[in-house]
Amino acid sequence: QVQLQESGPGLVKPSQTLSLTCTVSGGSITTNYYYWSWIRQPPGKGLEWIGYIEYSGSTYYSPSLKSRTSISRDTSENQFSLQLSSVTPEDTAVYYCARGGIGVPPVWGQGTQVTVSS
């Protein structure tokens, strides 16, 4: 059974780049036809989709975050990563990675808190 685990710094300074990694076990990130997402939830707000990377390596981003977002992968480590540049306190949130696919239930990581503060 596939499991996802987020990792990365819990505190980032304003204007810096937030970097998180999702390590996947129990399944390959190159398996047809899954996609691997990043989602966040700011305090007191709903879930916000950030973007995803497909099994093929293609990427798709939320239009509102596209200019600051990059999602990449390391197939040798079975990991995918998020980089969000020029962060502000409004980027403070719990960040989740998740696996999606047509006709299958999503699988989520447990989430990691990231706070943007000087």
Image: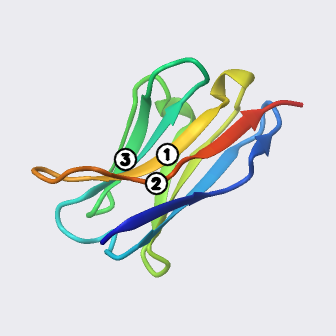
- Quadrant location of the C terminus? top right
- Which residue sits at x=33%, y=69%? 2
Task: Where is residue 47? Give x, y as percent.
Answer: 44, 28
Total numbered circles? 3
Q: Where does label 1 land, which residue?
A: 96
Which of the two discs, 1 and 3, sits closer to the camera? Answer: 1
Task: Where is residue 39? Give x, y as percent.
Answer: 45, 39
Task: Where is residue 75? Give x, y as percent.
Answer: 42, 75
Amino acid marked by disc 1? Tyr
**Distance from label 3 to label 2 (Cα)?**
14 Å
User: Do tag 3 and tag 2 residues touch (Cβ < 8 Å)?
Assistant: no
For the residue labelled by badge 1, is the local secondary structure a helix, a strand or a loop?
A: strand
Q: Where 46 sits versus 1, above or below?
A: above
Q: Where 23 sits versus 9, above or below?
A: below
For the residue labelled by badge 2, is the local secondary structure a helix, a strand or a loop?
A: loop
Query: Looking at the image, is mark 2 or mark 1 earlier in the sequence?
Result: 1
Viewer-proximal residue, 15 or 9? 9
Query: Looking at the image, is mark 3 or mark 2 earlier in the sequence?
Result: 3
Is disc 3 surrounded by few (<14), some (14 to 19) or many (20+) residues within 10 Å? many
Q: Where 72 sits versus 74, above or below?
A: above
- Which residue sits at x=68%, y=56%? 8
User: Do tag 1 and tag 3 residues touch (Cβ < 8 Å)?
Assistant: no
Q: Where does label 3 land, which residue?
A: 52
Q: Where does label 2 land, which residue?
A: 109
**Distance from label 2 to label 1 (Cα)?**
6 Å
- Quadrant location of the N terminus? bottom left
Amino acid marked by disc 3? Tyr
**Distance from label 1 to label 3 (Cα)?**
12 Å
Amino acid marked by disc 2? Gly
- Which residue sits at x=27%, y=50%? 106
For the residue labelled by badge 3, is the local secondary structure a helix, a strand or a loop?
A: strand
